[in-house]
Image (cartoon, rainbow, N blue to C red):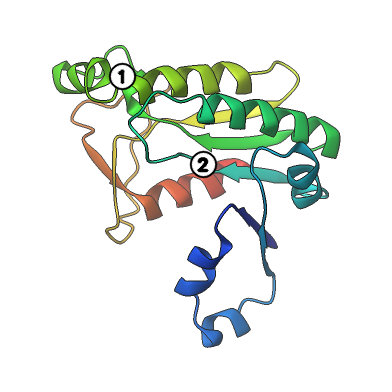
């Protein structure tokens, strides 16, 4: 794959990539930019087969950042003539996520839940081939290769998954 990483803080990516690793990945391009600027995003995704999004601000405050990002992404996808995208959302949006998820979704993470729902509404456009991934708690553990999927629902007992497994799933589905 040829990969373009378009990030608001590209130094966070480059800090994790040593010169040795970067030299072995000549098909990796890292761009910094404003994720809410349609022209910058369009330029970054131009010529791509698919876009994989992991945008998610870490605030619990009331915000429209997710929704606004979804709007910008859809504008940019259309302008760049890129049809396929995948986006990481949150398991808080599953209505049948269980007592704990529903409790957190309606209390501590209420603002995250509302903004994520609005983001998904912006993204779920009929002219685009979209997949929205709603993983439960994300961990930094190594990939297991054991991914359970249940369209529209959180699999029973689904409490955590590694970021690496989510990324592997998204790459597989992007084709």
Query: For the view shown, which residue lies furthest in the left direction?
Result: 99
Which residue is at a point 57% across and 62% down the rendered structure image?
10
Q: Which mark is residue 110?
A: 1
In this picture, residue 74 sits left or right of residue 141: right
Residue 175, visible in the rendered structure: no
Q: Give 116 or 148, whichever is nearer the viewer.
A: 116
Q: Position of residue 154 (x, y in %)?
A: 31, 25
Q: Secondary structure at mark 2?
A: loop
Residue 159, visible in the rendered structure: yes
Which residue is at a point 66% across and 37% down the rendered structure image?
36
Which residue is at a point 18% across and 17% down the rendered structure image?
103
> In which quadrant is the C terminus drawn?
top right
Q: Earlier in the sequence, mark 2 or mark 1?
A: 2
In this picture, residue 88 sits left or right of residue 22: left
C-alpha separation, residue under disc 2 versus residue under disc 1: 18 Å
Which residue is at a point 70% across and 15% down the rendered structure image?
126
> In which quadrant is the N terminus drawn?
bottom right
Q: Is residue 139 above or below residue 16?
A: above
In this picture, residue 39 sits left or right of residue 57: right
Query: For the view shown, which residue lies furthest in the bottom direction?
Result: 20
Q: Give 55 or 63, whichever is nearer the viewer.
A: 63
Mark 2 highlights which residue?
A: 55
How packed mark 1 is, by other alpha carbons closer than 10 Å (few <14, some 14-19, many 20 or more), is some
Q: Position of residue 37 (x, y in %)?
A: 72, 39
Q: Give 150 or 46, whichever is nearer the viewer.
A: 46
Q: Secondary structure at mark 1?
A: helix
Q: Is residue 140 above or below residue 95?
A: below
Instruction: Find residue 9 and report its image quarter.
Output: bottom right
């Amino acid at each position: 794959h040829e990969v373009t990483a378009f990030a608001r803080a590209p130094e966070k990516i480059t800090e994790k990539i040593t010169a040795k690793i970067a030299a072995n990945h000549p098909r990796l391009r890292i761009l910094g930019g404003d994720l809410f600027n349609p022209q910058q995003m369009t330029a970054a995704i131009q010529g791509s087969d698919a876009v994989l999004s992991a945008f998610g601000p870490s605030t619990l405050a009331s915000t429209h950042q997710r929704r606004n990002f979804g709007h910008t992404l859809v504008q940019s996808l259309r302008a760049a003539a890129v049809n396929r995208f995948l986006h990481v959302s949150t398991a808080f949006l599953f209505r049948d996520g269980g007592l704990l998820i529903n409790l957190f979704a309606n209390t501590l993470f209420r603002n995250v839940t509302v903004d994520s729902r609005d983001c998904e509404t912006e993204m779920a456009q009929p002219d685009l081939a979209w997949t929205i991934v709603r993983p439960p708690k994300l961990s930094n553990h190594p990939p297991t290769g054991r991914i359970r999927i249940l369209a529209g629902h959180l699999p029973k007992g689904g409490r955590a998954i590694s970021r690496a497994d989510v990324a592997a799933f998204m790459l597989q589905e992007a084709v």
